[in-house]
Image: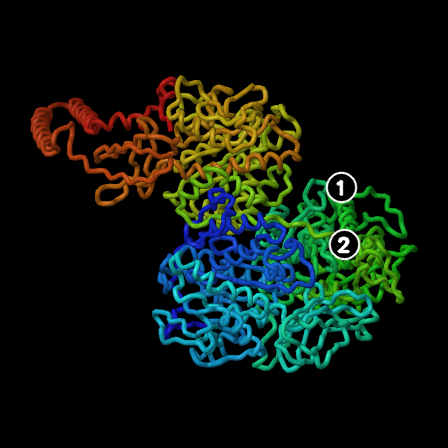
Amino acid sequence: MLVLEVLELPGRRPRGRPERRFLDVVKEDISRCGADTVEETYDKYYSYVDLTARLQSLAQKYSHIANVSSIGRSVEGRELWVVRVTIDPNADSPGKPKFKYVGNMHGDETVSRQVLVYLVEYLLTKYGEDPRITELVNTTDIYIMPSMNPDGFEKSREGDCSGDSGGRSNARNMDLNRSFPDQYDGTTARREDIPEVMAVIRWIQEKKFVLSGNLHGGTVVASYPFDDSASHQRQGRYSPSEDDTLFRYLALVYSQNHPVMKTGQPNCPDAQEETFKDGITNGAQWYDVSGGMQDYNYLYGNCLEITMELSCCKYPPAAELRNEWDLNRESLLAYMEQVHIGVRGYVTEATSGAALTNVSIIVAGIRHNLTTGKYGDYYRLLLPGTYNITAVAPGYISMTFYSVQVTEGEATELNFTLAPVPSAATGHNTPTFSTPSTTRNKNSPPLLPPEDQAIQPQEFRHHNYADMELFLRNYNSEFPSIAHLYSIGRSVEDRELYVMAISGNPTVHDHGEPEFKYVANMHGNEVVGRELLLNLIEYLCRNYGTDPEVTQLINNTRIHIMPSMNPDGYEAAIEGDVRSYKGRNNSNNFDLNRNFPDQFFTITEPRQPETIAVMNWLKSIPFVLSANLHGGSLVVNYPYDDDKEGTIQYSQSPDDKVFQQVSRAYSQENPLMHNGHPCEDLYPDEYFVDGVTNGANWYNVPGGMQDWNYLNTNCFEVTIELGCVKYPMAKDLPKYWEQNRRALLQFIHQVHTGIKGTVSDSRDGTGIPNATINTNISEKNWRLSKYSKSQKGPQPTQNPSEKEFQSLIKDLSLGPGLEQLVKSTATENSFRYRRYKELSAFLRGLTLNFPKITSLHTLGQSVEFRTIWALEISNKPREAESSEPKIRFVAGIHGNAPVGTELLLEFAAFLCINYGKNPVITRLINETRIVIVPSINPDGREQAVEKQCTSTQGLTNAHGKDLDTDFFGNASQRVAEAQPETRAMMDLILEKGYTLSVALDGGSLVATYPYDKPVQSVENEGTLKYLAGVYANNHPKMHLGTTACSMGNIPDGVIRAAERQSHMGSMKDFSVDFGHCPEITVYTGCCLFPPAEQLATLWAENKAALLSMLLEVHKGVRGVVRDRSGQPIVGAIVVLNGGVRVFSMEGGYFHALLAPGSHSIEAVADGYQQQRQEVRSSAISIIIELDMDNSIFGLPREFVVASAAASMTALVVTACIIWCVCAAKSNHQKDGFHRLRQHRDDYEDEIRLTSMGSKKSLLAHEFQDESESEEETLYANKI
């Protein structure tokens, strides 16, 4: 790794800063900014919240020419907002070159951030009024990113001219302008440390920008490439690019339109001697910068970029902003207009007229090429002159225009038409993609980063259904711009048939972009393909934007990956299975690869749901190429799979040569497959030439999927057998990835061979679907004729900005904060009920996919020996954090009401999937210990029946006991031994340390608070009712109070539990009385066991309410009890409002929830004086310091001690006299002496208890005799 020494060079500010602290992240409250469409005042800096509101407001007001979206997120989760300004901003159309400005790359260089916001507003407000602006917007695709480093900005301070506040770098102390791949040093930064850079890299690769400006601060000059040289000489070494003259011109355009910059004399206070001729400089000559963004744009991104330094002071007072805008306005506009100089045009295919992408445009004498975009368009910036220009593409004859005259002003239009080389005309041309040469002139910059930097999958294991589902949902959430998870149907056992689409636009079919698919695990016990496709998803997603091959494939292909077509069979299969049939078929015991309609034979078996789903899927998307991944041999098998005689013989399709070609493309990249001897131990006589075979020539398969693909759709499919062992051990999975990685990618490349084009109506140019394409050779080739219009994607989400954590809680609790969080954290899921086995697998899947924030514990076992699981979610799940509030979510105490169980499983997945992606969720998990017990009564759940709204089947455990009547803290109250499920939960509750507990049940739509037992009054009722009310108020129906089933109207949807159904021994009461933790019970719906189709609605109704509990647990009063020396006091009693008691834990921490209002707090500990104070807040942190108690019975300690000493002396003397008298007596008299000693011990115990004085009343309840009456216990130990 290159290490740059930071020096104070003459006239320069250091480009590195110390590591910053992780900022508290808060939910932005756009509502407080209002619909900010007022005229710009140029007198303030926009915080992240203000910036977000301003940009969204402008985009909304001028939606016909602007939209706002995010290209990614910062370390701390802030969106990297980009405003797109152009006519029809929601569509991507050819003919408009793409331009971008990026500001605030260094967080403490802030003028650019504001100036770019002003530029956005200027373009929008002047459009239609100013002809110049109107022309620019109509003809240019403009992208403006005001802040690339929003985390650094939030740390910076106004008036800091030299950057001493430390906001220059990102939140992981990485200088973003030293973190791009460098032409000399390669990549030096870890990807996880620079999410901002990775997002911009993906953006650059995707958009193919033509011209760009990177706005900085610290002096006043325009700097152009290169920024470094091979020698990395610190200063004074001019490092020219191939377009050096053009770059100098572009830099001059900016500087000469800037009144200060053009003088070349910035006159910065700390570098008054620094000058720049004409206000421009070569970057490396100024000083060497390795890993800079402008060089990356030029070398790797088709884009010419320069860096503009706008002001001497990095973060000047806001009063100077108007002047900075006036100084830069004309420069910004004039520079943007340069995107239209040089040469522009299209490259098309000669025979079909189709656009050709990734064609190299070569200008003789300038050794820097660019490539065409998705519509075959290119924009080559050139200065006036005469040029020879060539278009080159693999598989096509190159074409050159000589003596092309480029004039000043608008670009010269130059269109190329390329004819295929002779081999390409027969359908055997090489793929239209290229990889960088391994050797090159050292002065010629690489076009793309080296391939060997690709990130490989990190974990190899067998994924059961729950694990696979969580894996897919996680990648869908983490890479939303290129990944889209969807389901095509369900299996016999109601498991989703998931597909992950990966593309630059994954949700829709793009015109001219081929559709490709992989399907695996059709036979449930053939599992290698399933794991390879999960590996492939990880590989594609994590390498997009940095690996050239992956980026090219994703940008030009829509890749559909179905890891498991037979998830039911997989669950029945056994690891280590070599060649058996266990799990091969679906749950109805049908072989899915014998279940498709066949051309030669009638398939009599009923069509299975998995088969029907796949057939419908294939008819809905115009797939071009596909592979079906199997196991049991090592070969690629191509159609036909059978023949009309049903004998083993070659059954040739019309496209036999094409099938052979694509099959060999896979086998040749597999180091074992192409040898042709797949499984010599199992099948010694089996041999396949080149590792490929015709299906029917191997063995007959009527009803196979690959033949149905070919005969009934536009899709060519082969079947790939990946290994001799059907279900290998997990330890062997890495070698399968190594053997197949290149082959999997190479096979995708084959989708770009052959011919492609569009069939359109000659009258109006509209596409004609379902047209038949005939060729003059025997092969059908590939037919692309179904096209669909792009859909508008999801709107960008909002994220929190920097404030204190309690401000986050407050903002989320008030107004639309929580609603915004719910909208911004949608996760794809298809709900269904899970029985015990699937529930356990799901929980284990969470720990496997999110090991850093989850820990799974067993609380005990049920009567029928099912484990009662507890999942902890926190940033340190295996460490005790007494300073963090601890919340408990439980469900399933009644097995016939399983909705709560499913809600908590989804809640757990929701939290895990959004951790590290959504800053609010991340912060809440970091600050909270969340314990989820999804099923207390798993035995009862196994007996319950779906769609039974009132049935009691499954209500009790296997012993017939209603567990919610089995929680008793005193032996005198218990008539029988506690049930094992009850004991497991009681042990968890008695761990103490919990601040709040929420239990989910069914049969009503209401929130209840303690007590279930009949009591005249409830201590701390206001707080308990308040907590239940918070849940109800965040539920769209519950708070109305009118849908409480048979209970009639319930005001606000909240009721004391005893008023709903009074009973003894409830978990809620036990939690309050003995766990000192308030618990509310939420009844999620009138139907105990509603149909699974209703679960998605129930989740939507309860999502915000569940999140609100995570907010409430951070309210109330929390703090530390310590002595005057600062030592924490453990076990101190904190009495709230004269009744509710909590105890200080390790570190002296305590926490109690309280309703908003005034409250009194008393603290007492043995040996310390009692303290009392008043607080007037429902979310406050306090420190209680206790003085040593120097009095006994109200008398000075010294007097009492002296008196006690005199008494003890008298007792000793008396004892001696008695001993002397008794020494002469018999043995039975000695026994009396022993009785006297025992009596004395009792007396001393009484003295000890009496000495506790006024504290006795506070502590009395902690030493209750278990023999006390039920009535006495009824009112004891309230919280």
Q: Residues within 10 Å of mark 1 (few under 14, many from 20)?
A: some
Q: Height in image: 1055 above or below 367? A: above
Instruction: Give the residue at the far right of this rendering.
Output: 645
- Residue bearing mark 2: 787
- Residue bearing mark 1: 588
Residue 407: % across, % down: 65, 76
Q: Which residue is drawn at 84% across and 56% down?
A: 763
Residue 1174 image-quadrant placement: top left
Say whether residue 599 is left or right of residue 923.
right
In this view, the mark in front (2 or 1): 2
Say whether residue 46 is left or right of residue 691.
left
Residue 1072: % across, % down: 41, 29
Quadrant that contains the C terminus = top left
Q: Residues within 10 Å of mark 2 (few under 14, many from 20)?
A: some
The residue closer to the viewer here, 80 or 952, is 80
Residue 516: % across, % down: 73, 58
Q: Which amino acid does label 2 sit on?
A: Tyr
